[in-house]
Structures are given as structure tokens and as C-alpha cells.
Image: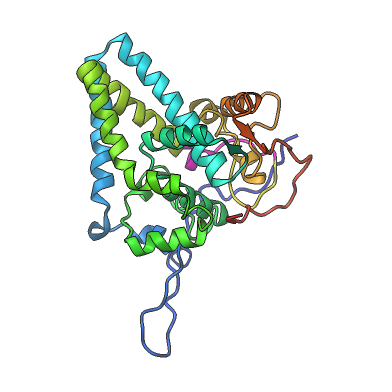
């Protein structure tokens, strides 16, 4: 049975909620800001835009709009296969349930393939994705959540990505939220080569099938993956039903679950983030969980947490712990 709770949907943060008070230091030095401060909405200013991210997003969306004019069936099939590979295997299975929440372990070759798939999604390097997601869980729908729709729907869906962060701010995020991952050789490899994989994939697609393959296999596919993930950030904190009474606004939304390969059962996930399956009711289909079960059957995944607690009430969002 679903649990109904009072909702904060539609409520905007007040200025006091989005702008931390400036403390006074005894020596007059600049105050040390919290690690989540770079994601406050007032940081999105003309002089603080990440132009690389913005330009990339514009280019991918422009390519997706052009793709229907370069249609062929081979390119469409390639886009669908790569959408599954980069979204379900790369993001949902790899970056999210494996890396961010450690819901299971993978043998080394499969671990490499999933991290490669995540890199090819274009959603960021493994450490950036995992650290940002752990921050989201710790401060979900509170001040400092990177993408809460309580600020605005467009902020949670897209514009939070355009805030520029300094290398020092990024390292502070890693140190707090991913200390267990920072010295991993495989992760460091993908941190250093992340953008090269994106460029190489585009070159390979163009070499195989020309402009149709590039526009469908890279641009259209990437835009579909982007908006599927972004709907988890935005739509599933605005609409849907709740199986669990958690303090944030996470909800289960069927059409996002279809689009995002099972990730739309977001209230379930926020209640039990370490559990490897997101669908907790028989009708909540979770294709990414099917992939995890297949890997486990083939002994390529192990130590899988598949135990759903019987009930959760009055529970806070899970802390983003490294262990």
C-alpha cells in the first residue's frame, strides 16, 4: 500500500534557504563555505557559467534536431542499442547502483565495460557523477541538493549543470563524498580519458556510417539518455506515488521508469538506496535489475544486495557515506 504524506511540491526556497548566511571570522579572512555551496542557485551567473558544458549540450541538441533529416534504419538501430548500453548499463547499473551505492560488486572486465559505458553516456566522469549523486542523497530536497525541483523544475532538470566549479571545489567534493574511490586505478584512468572516449565514439560512428550514424548514434542517443536521467532528478521529485515515507519529495513515476530503465521508482530507491533493485512491487518493472541478475547468474556480479526491508516509516534520506 502506498503511503500518502503532506507534500512540499510547488514550494520555492526562500532567500534564506538558498543563500547561506555569511559568518564573521575573527581574523577577517574569507569564511570557508560548505562543500555543497557551488550548487546554490545564485551561483548561476553570467560570469560563472561552464561554457564547455553549455556548448556541448547545445551541440548535442542541435544534432538531435537535425537527425530526422538524415534518417536510416541502421542508424536508428544503433541509437537504440547505444541508448540501452550507455543509459541502463553505463548510468543505471554502473555509475549509480554499482559505483555510487555499492549495491553489488563486479569482476574486473565487466567493471571496465560498465565504466566505459558510463563515460560514453556523456554525463560526466565516474568520480564526478558518484560524488554529486552521494551529495544529492545526503541533502535531498534541502539546501545544497545539486538538483532539487523545490528551487524550480528547470533548475533540477537542466540548468544546475551550467554552474562552473573550480578544481579546488571539485576536489573538496571528492574528498568528502568519494574518498573510497579516489585512488582506484581504473577510475583514475577514466577520469583522465573521459572526454577522449566521447570524441573517439563520435569519430568511430562517422567513420562507420557517415552523418546519419553520427547524428543518431551520438547526438540523438545522448539527448535521450540525458533527458531520461534528468527526469529522475526533476519529475520523480514532483509527481507520482510513494511506497515509503521519507523526508524528501522522491516519488515513483512509471513513465520515467520506462524511459530510464527502472530508475523512475525513485521513492523506493531513496528509502533503500543500497538495494540493487529499484522496483519493489511486482508491477514496478526494472530492466536494469534484470541485467544485474543476469550478471550474477553468469558469476560476473556478486555480493548483490537484493533484500527489500518489509517496511519503512519516518525515515530520513540516506547519508552519503563512503563505505
Please name the residue shown 36% across and 79% down the image. 30
**Residue stretch rendered in magenta on the structure:** 231-243
Q: Please provide percent x and percent y for residue 227.
A: 40, 34
**73, above or below 309, in the image:** above
Where does residue 85 sit, x and y in percent of width and height? 44, 26
Residue 274 belongs to the span the image colors magenta: no
The residue positioned 27% from the left and 52% from the top of the image is 50
Q: Quadrant of the N terminus?
A: top right
**Residue 36 drawn at (x, y percent):** 45, 61
Residue 152 in view, yes or no: no
Colour scheme: rainbow
Position of 114 with respect to 154 (left or right) is right
Is the C terminus in the top left, top right, bottom left or bottom right quadrant? bottom right
Q: Where is residue 131? Give x, y as percent.
A: 48, 52
Residue 32: image quadrant is bottom left
Return the residue nearer the eye: 320 or 188: 188
Tell me if 50 is positioned left or right of 30 in this view. Answer: left
236 falls in the magenta region: yes
The answer to whether 286 is drawn above or below residue 213 in the figure is below
The relative height of residue 150 versus residue 175 in the rendered view (above or below) is: above
Residue at the image position 45 percent from the left and 31 percent from the top: 87
Instruction: In the displayed orientation, state which residue is furthest to the bottom.
Output: 26
Query: Which residue occupies the foreground of this view, 67 or 100?
Result: 100
- Is 2 positioned to the left or the right of 163 in the image? right
View extreme (top): residue? 73
Whether residue 174 is visible to the viewer of this picture, yes or no, is yes
Amino acid at each position: 500500500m502506498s503511503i500518502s504524506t503532506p507534500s512540499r511540491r510547488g514550494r520555492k526556497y526562500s532567500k534564506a534557504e538558498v543563500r547561506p548566511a555569511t559568518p564573521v571570522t575573527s581574523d577577517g579572512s574569507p569564511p570557508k563555505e560548505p562543500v555543497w555551496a557551488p550548487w546554490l542557485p545564485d551561483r548561476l551567473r553570467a560570469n560563472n557559467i561552464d561554457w564547455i558544458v553549455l556548448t556541448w549540450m547545445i551541440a548535442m541538441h542541435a544534432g538531435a534536431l537535425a537527425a530526422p533529416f538524415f534518417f536510416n534504419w541502421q542508424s536508428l538501430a544503433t541509437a537504440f542499442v547505444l541508448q540501452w548500453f550507455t543509459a541502463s548499463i553505463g548510468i543505471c547499473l554502473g555509475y549509480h547502483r554499482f559505483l555510487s551505492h555499492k549495491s553489488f560488486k563486479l569482476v574486473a572486465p565487466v567493471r571496465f565495460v560498465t565504466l566505459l559505458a558510463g563515460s560514453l553516456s556523456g554525463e560526466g566522469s565516474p568520480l564526478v557523477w558518484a560524488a554529486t549523486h552521494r551529495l544529492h542523497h545526503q541533502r535531498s530536497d534541502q539546501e545544497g541538493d545539486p538538483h532539487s525541483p523545490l528551487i524550480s523544475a528547470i533548475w533540477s532538470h537542466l540548468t544546475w549543470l551550467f554552474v562552473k566549479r573550480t578544481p579546488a571545489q571539485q576536489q573538496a567534493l571528492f574528498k568528502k563524498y568519494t574518498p573510497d574511490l579516489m585512488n582506484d586505478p581504473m577510475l583514475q584512468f577514466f577520469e583522465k580519458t573521459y572526454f577522449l572516449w566521447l570524441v573517439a565514439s563520435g569519430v568511430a560512428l562517422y567513420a562507420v556510417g557517415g552523418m546519419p550514424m553520427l547524428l543518431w548514434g551520438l547526438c540523438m542517443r545522448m539527448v535521450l539518455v540525458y533527458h531520461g536521467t534528468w527526469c529522475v532528478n526533476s519529475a520523480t521529485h514532483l509527481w507520482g506515488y510513494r511506497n515509503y515515507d521519507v523526508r524528501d519529495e522522491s516519488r515513483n513515476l512509471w513513465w520515467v521508469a520506462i524511459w530510464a530503465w527502472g530508475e523512475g521508482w525513485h521513492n523506493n530507491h531513496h528509502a533503500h538506496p543500497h538495494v540493487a533493485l529499484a522496483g519493489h512491487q511486482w508491477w514496478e518493472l526494472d530492466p536494469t535489475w534484470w541485467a544485474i541478475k543476469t550478471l550474477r547468474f553468469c558469476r560476473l556480479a556478486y555480493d548483490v544486495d537484493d533484500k527489500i526491508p518489509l517496511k519503512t516509516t519516518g525515515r530520513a534520506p540516506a547519508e552519503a557515506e563512503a563505505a
